[in-house]
Amino acid sequence: MQKRETTRHIVVQTTNAIAMRQWLCEKLFFQAASENEVYNGDCVFRFVDGESCKPAEISEDFRYVGLGHVALSTADIRRAMEYCQSVGLTMVTQGNDAFFNPKVFGKGEFYFHIQTPFGFTLEIAQRVEQPTEKRNTQQIMGIDHIGVPCSNLEREIKALHVAGFIPLFEPVLNDNDTDGRIRCCMLSDGMVTLEVYQFLDRKSVPMPQCSPIYAIGSYPPMKTPGGLILCS
């Protein structure tokens, strides 16, 4: 597996970079670039020293906003689920199947979640209209998108436009029993795709500063209205 040239990375706060690096390499096909950096295709995690904790459980009437999750790509969602089960990962699925969002990336996207032992969530996602370069590879390969829940979708899109992110389609409205109505839009700067979404029926709570997935670099430093941190 060759590392794809990119200057973008996800900043992860941890007091045990060794354990996190080992887990990602053993379970999810990452490779170590250095003591403080691992990669899987074009997905790069860079570890920084910092006290991190899993965000505390909050009332069902509230949702955190900021940097929510990282979604890794697969060309076959069922094979990816079987693989994750085989290595004992803690998964969140819809019954024993993947979730499906029919309103994004043309014909929709399948996905499920992995609860890591380090307090953050990874998503595994397959676009129905899968890019050719993502097909016929290992079960999990590279980054699909980064989830950014926000308190005001229009304000967040406007702020991210300053950083070079352009919407890939007009915002869509999703609805489910757990989260209510959710407005969603995918934005890209040509290297990174962000899934920006707003819970219309839930109140917003800022992501705690101790959240392990902390920021996206390398960008001119800024913080969006919803709390997403871009850093150099």
Image: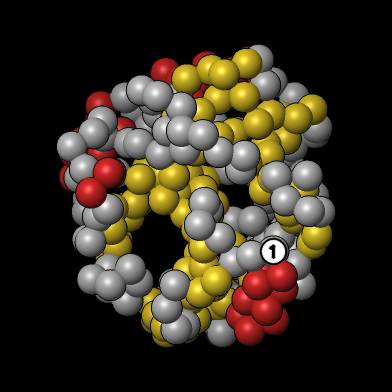
Q: Nearer the viewer, residue 130 or 69?
A: 130
Q: Position of residue 149 (x, y in %)?
A: 60, 67
Quarter of the image where one finds residue 208: bottom right
Q: Nearer the viewer, residue 61 or 161?
A: 161
Residue at 67% from the left image edge and 69% from the top image edge: 160
Q: Position of residue 95 (x, y in %)?
A: 25, 56
Q: Is residue 6 visible?
A: yes
Residue at 61% from the left image edge and 43% from the top image edge: 8
Q: Nearer the viewer, residue 52 or 224?
A: 224
Q: Secondary structure at mark 1?
A: loop
Q: Position of residue 217 (x, y in %)?
A: 69, 45
Residue at 41% from the left image edge and 39% from the top image edge: 142
Which color scheme does this rendered protein use? secondary structure
Tell me if residue 9 comes above or below residue 31 in the rendering.
Answer: below
Quarter of the image where one finds residue 6: top right
197 relative position to 11: left or right? left
Residue at 33% from the left image edge and 68% from the top image edge: 105
Quarter of the image where one finds residue 228: bottom right
Tell me if residue 76 comes above or below residue 68 in the rendering.
Answer: above
147 relative position to 173: left or right? right
Tell me if residue 219 comes above or below residue 159 in the rendering.
Answer: above
Q: Is residue 205 visible?
A: no
Q: Residues within 10 Å of mark 1 (few under 14, many from 20)?
A: some
Amino acid type shown at disc 1? Ala
227 relative position to 71: left or right? right
> What residue did someone put label 1 on?
163
79 relative position to 71: left or right? left
Q: Position of residue 220 (x, y in %)?
A: 78, 53
Number of labels in the image equals: 1
